[in-house]
Amino acid sequence: MSRHTPLLAALLLGCGPSQAPVDIEEMVTYGFVQYDERLDRGLRDLGEHLIPWVNQHFEEAEAGYTVGSLTAEHLAAVGIERELEAGIVGAVVGIDYDISMDTFAWALAHPNQTEIFPAYLEAERTTEDDLDCFRARECEWFRAHDVLHTSLVASLGWEAWSEMDVNLRWLELEDGTPVIAHWNFVPDPITLNTDIFEIHQQYAFTYSWEREDGQVRRAQAIWVDGQVLVDDVAEDFMLSVGITGIIAAAGDLEAWGQAQEAAAE
């Protein structure tokens, strides 16, 4: 299969996307485990390599790459203790947003996520962090806990119920580029109303930065641990559902952000 075949199509066909170069899969797993490395330059050093790579390979990144699996050691590094028989399969996608970094940050931290993402049928967010301080870039971290009821595939009536820890961190690279590092942790099984597959846990790491034109570029990795329960569905189908959600959510976030910016003019 061509390395330029769109990720979703490749997964649905059951043959999987092309394997990423070793450097990109190492970069996103490295970023994932930097969650509590607050006192070193780990995430800033990541940007010095990841941003040029994504910029140079953006067409391929938009199509998507498979990346290395997460292991129990990776999860333990971010404080999650889970036994795994095998690694958790993953993929990374490059996304552009034609909105400002401030609008993008507001969308990620917004207290009512159902206003932004129609796939969220219900979303309850709780946090002890100062949202206004984070939006002003005066507080480095914003963390929240989401209780979610999500439409996975509306045409099939598939829905999911889950709880997710959201972790956002502002960074600034040496050249002044603002970055948001973003981790989503879903360590407990997701309840589904379909018997076709099951998801035991799911994780995401995203690195988003301000482009030279003042708008946003993002490398988003997702890892899914689950299994298909019927014989005639591709093994990578669960990952395809997750990637479909990423692509749809990117469009929803951009549309919401553009509406916010237009209203402020």
Image (spheres, rainbow, N blue to C red):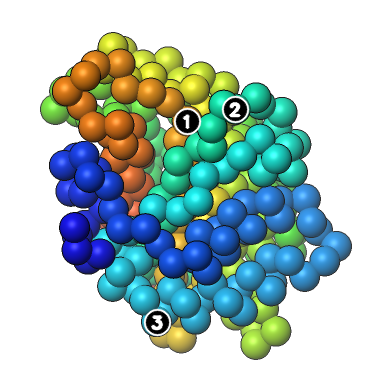
Residue identified by numbered label 3: 56
Q: Which of 211 and 220 lies nearest the eye of the viewer?
A: 220
**In contact (CB < 8 Å): disc 3 and disc 2:** no
Residue identified by numbered label 2: 84
Residue 223, horizontal then vertical, whole percent: 47, 41
Residue 198, horizontal then vertical, whole percent: 38, 19
Would residue 143 be visible to someone looking at this image? no
Mark 3, Cα crowd under 10 Å, few <14 / some 14-19 / many 20+, is: few
Mark 1, Cα crowd under 10 Å, few <14 / some 14-19 / many 20+, is: many
Mark 3 or 2 closer to N-term?
Answer: 3
**Cα–Cα gap, marks 1 and 2:** 9 Å
Mark 1 or 2 closer to N-term?
Answer: 2
Q: Is residue 30 left or right of residue 242?
A: right
Residue identified by numbered label 1: 225
Q: Which amino acid does label 2 sit on?
A: Leu
Q: Which of 237 and 205 lies nearest the eye of the viewer?
A: 237
Quarter of the figure with residue 137: bottom right
Per the rendering, the mark at residue 42 is: none
Compared to residue 92, the image places residue 175 above or below, namely below
- Tell me the residue at 40%/62% (across/down): 20
- Tell me the residue at 25%/64% (across/down): 3
Q: Is residue 3 left or right of residue 68?
A: left
* Quadrant position of the N terminus in the picture: bottom left
- Tell me the residue at 34%/74% (across/down): 58
Q: What residue type is labelled 1?
A: Asp
Callout 3: SS? helix
